[in-house]
Image (spheres, rainbow, N blue to C red):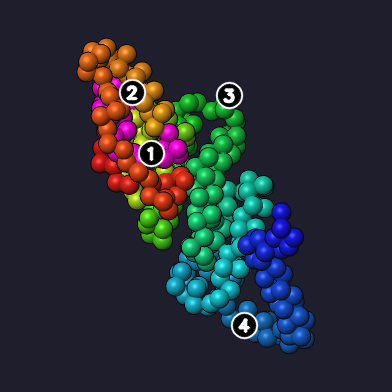
Amino acid sequence: MHEGSFIEHPLVIRLRRIVVVLLVLIFVGALLRPIESPAWQVVKSGQSELNLEGIEGSLGQGLVVGVLGGFRAIMADFMWIRVNTIWERRDRTKLDAMIRLSTTLDPRQSFFWFNGARMIAYDVPNWRIREEGGYSEVPDSRQDEINREQAEQAFIFLEKAREFHPDEPKLVVEVAQIYLNRLKDIPNAADWFLKTSKMPNAPYFAARIYAELLRRQGLDREAYDYLRELYSELPNDPYAQKNIILERIRTLESILEVQYLLRFNPGDVSPVIAPANSHPEHSHHGHNH
């Protein structure tokens, strides 16, 4: 590793800025402390109690951003540190408020959206079920109800995220994964993986998972037709894993008992060359099936 490369890491730079701002705030606070207490008592006597949740609810994002100005990203980082502390205590009420405050302060930070959605959809249901007696005591119907409630909150949260990141396929994948992994809802998961596969810069795996979910629903013929067309459209890019797709095509041909002369012939497919600047995990653009 080149000497000094660690110092230039973006996280180190951001933390260094936070430390500088903290030191400045502490210094200014020390100077103002003699006059702060009397002035605050005057203001507080005529105002209702202030709290972080009220900032978001009563002012809204526009005014919050206007008040904080260039400090909003740093404040969002502090709020997210607070999120992790609350998460460790499993305080789901405060967790929800702080996640939303963090994304209000800095909606450009996709990290907040992804991890916030996962906490809402995966962690909070576990906490709620344990609060009600645990998995061995809570009926399956009640567990399903809790999972559905939290998933719906995560879906609303991710829909809001897409207002700020409309071209980010990973946000759509997140919805698909919640349907698949948390709700065990294969049809809806398949629809969302298909939706992802049609987006610009979609990850290659979205289309493969969609085909696999068709198979899980017993739709072998539909999966077979889809994979044949997918193979034809994919570029000759190692990350596209066309060899795996061809293996799945052959498996389906055996299951469907496709006659040998009618089997898929990859040699008849004109090669599609991957763009030189394509991202290694993305470049399956706009597949329409």
Along the viewing direction, whichever of 205 and 232 lies nearer the viewer: 232
**Could you say which disc has been placed on residue 249 in the image?**
2
Q: Amino acid at mark 3?
A: Ser
First of labels 2, 3 by sequence position: 3
Q: Residue at x 42, y 46 (%)?
A: 282
Residue 43 sits in which quadrant? bottom right
Q: Amino acid at mark 1?
A: Asn
- Residue 196 location, x and y as percent? 36, 44
First of labels 2, 1 by sequence position: 1
Along the viewing direction, whichever of 86 and 273 lies nearer the viewer: 273
Circle 1 residue? 236
Q: Residue at x 59, y 71 (%)?
A: 49
Along the viewing direction, whichever of 199 and 216 lies nearer the viewer: 199
Q: CA distance from mark 2 to mark 3?
A: 42 Å
Q: Is residue 218 visible?
A: no
**Is 192 left, or right, of 31 in this rendering?**
left
Q: Residue at x 29, y 21 (%)?
A: 220
Vertical position of residue 3 compared to residue 215: above or below:
below
Number of other residues with Cα within 10 Å of mark 4, as a class: few under 14, some 14 to 19, many 20 or more: few
Q: Which residues are magenta?
A: 214-241
**Label 2: which secondary element:** helix
Number of other residues with Cα within 10 Å of mark 2, as a class: few under 14, some 14 to 19, many 20 or more: many
Number of other residues with Cα within 10 Å of mark 3, as a class: few under 14, some 14 to 19, many 20 or more: few
| Marks 2 & 3, CB-CB < 8 Å contact | no
Circle 4 residue? 43
Q: CA distance from mark 2 to mark 4?
A: 72 Å
Vertical position of residue 21 compared to residue 226: above or below:
below
Front disc: 1 or 4? 1
